[in-house]
Image (tube, grey):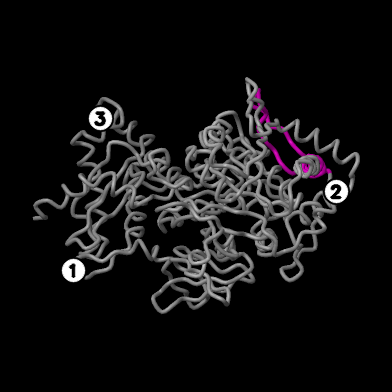
Amino acid sequence: MDTLPLTLDHRPPTIAHLFLDRARTSPDAPAYRFPAVEGGTWNELTWAQAAQRVMAMAAGLLSLGTAPTERVAIASSTRVEWILADLATMCAGLATTTVYPTTNADEAAFVLADSESRVLFAENAGQVRKVLSEQARLPDLTCVIVIDEPEEPLTSEHLTILTLPELERRGAAYLVDRPDAVQESIGKLSPDQLATLIYTSGTTGRPKGVRLVHDCWSYQGVAPVITGMMRPDDVHYLWLPLSHVFGKTLISGQIASGHVMAVDGRVDRIVDNLRTVRPTVMAAVPRIYEKIYSGIMARTPRGTAAPDPRTVRAAFGGRLRIAICGSAPLDTEITSFFLDAGVPVLEGYGLTETAAGSTVNRADDIRVGTVGLPYPGTEIRIAEDGEILLRGPGVMRGYHGLPEETAEVLDADGWLRTGDIGTLDSDGHLRITDRKKDLFKTSGGKYVAPSEIEGRLKALCPFVANTVVIGDRRNYCTALITLDATVLLPWASGQGIPGGYADVVADPATRRLIDGYVRTLNEGLQRWQTIKKFTLLPRDLDVEHGELTPSLKVKRAAVTRRYDGEIAAMYQGGVT
């Protein structure tokens, strides 16, 4: 694999330039592997083949009469076509709008309308129907491109509907008459031109469109390569949602590095894919590492020796070099467990507003409990109230159409108020305490960081899936707890407890089981932090009910609203 001469000070102006450089430098090297439609095998695209498809798709977008920086939305799960569509959009001088495929029609229409998207890549007929049901709200949308061939023709009086092969054929024909059209489009791109609108999944209210320019992604491509996090000989397994900034930034690093990326967004295939792909690099949100940890610990009797490291490594395919963790905190006990087993989990930190990567632990300098050192070129300050401030090339240029909200978080000198509380150690490693808005004060005047307590319980108890600690302006703390069915039900079977999840959760034996873990948790907490009462919920939190963001963060406000009765009951009669 040939390497590109990348430096932070002389980085390519855009990912489009970087992608073409990669295709010219490593034309025959594998770029992407992806599941075949049938047979359980994997297909492969070289960099030259990927570039050929991207050029045709970009030309197809130009043939639709699009103008520079107009938005092209992508509503699809993680798959190789998502990446190709994103690259084609940028090569055509347009800007990508990301739409979670799990969002309902109302939310999808809001994002498309707010972004003024002209074109939509829709994964399948289901995504198209969302748009068709909301056409009155989408006057700017003129064309929908369907990735999966629909079983029945889709028609609309107001929209042009094309299949992806039709767009590529249209682009190939466009290039016959204008062979340099895409290269000319790329040549006109500037580092400060809008490249992407990513809408914050948010835990309250409507999402805001984060304006990320081409230089944000060029920076996110070069930084992990020059820090050694990504290498040309890596095999990278990508399953994260590409509508989320964490997933999308990995594309940039992969292009800069030139390593092969196996792409499959089906969460139910993660375990099987790890065995098949045998990656050297993977990235995930904490919930994935928590589930793997819980599964291993559930099979390890309490008080016995730790599992054989070979067993732990085998769960990741056997040759993992690094595992990257971001989006939310991972408990230090879990991080240490994997590190001791030879699976270094590198916690990092970033926001949608910083194009993801801002800090990360280095493989040769892992400081457990921190999110590592800043990327070269990123600056960190801690405000007087403890809030983390960031400045660097990855920082957004503002919220789309929201100047007042932009001014609230981004000052004239480029410093971004993150909304997170943290500290820097003497060597510059960043430690996150909590979300500023999540910190609460008990009626006794004591501050509580709920995510710290929640993380400890997840590490301590392999049965816990999600926890929401409550206690704002109350005289003691309580918790809503959900359990992991994949661990709980086998335990229940062994205990002779019949029924499904809800039945097992309601059984007194389950209550006694979790109570033991909560008591152990409380032994390590300050008095005002201890969980005096808890409620086991009849199902886990999920995205569909609006309780988790698509990146699996808990929407605290939504959860407390839904279970306000259960919360009130925990404060009736006080504690003895």
x, y (%) of residue 179?
90, 45
Which residues, given as a range, are shown in magenta? 28-54
Sequence order check, earlier mark of 1 and 3: 1
Does 565 appear above or below 17?
A: above
Say the numbered circle drawn on residue 444. Answer: 1
Residue kind at label 1, given as amino acid type: Gly
Say the numbered circle drawn on residue 181. Answer: 2
Q: CA distance from mark 1 to mark 3?
A: 37 Å
Q: Secondary structure at mark 3?
A: helix
Residue kind at label 2, given as amino acid type: Ala
Residue 40 counted in the magenta span: yes
Viewer-proximal residue, 305 or 32? Answer: 32
Say the numbered circle drawn on residue 411. Answer: none
Does 319 appear above or below 216?
A: above
Residue kind at label 3, given as amino acid type: Asp
Sequence order check, earlier mark of 1 and 2: 2
Q: Residue at x 54, y 73 (%)?
A: 415
Does 152 appear above or below 139?
A: above
Whether pointer 1 and pointer 3 mark residues with C-beta atoms closer than 8 Å, the reply is no
Can residue 496 be seen in the rendering of this structure? yes
In this figure, which residue is indicated by the disc labeled 3?
503
Sequence order check, earlier mark of 2 and 3: 2
Callout 1 crowding tier (Cα within 10 Å): few <14, some 14–19, many ≥20: few
Q: Secondary structure at mark 2?
A: helix
Q: CA distance from mark 2 to mark 3?
A: 63 Å
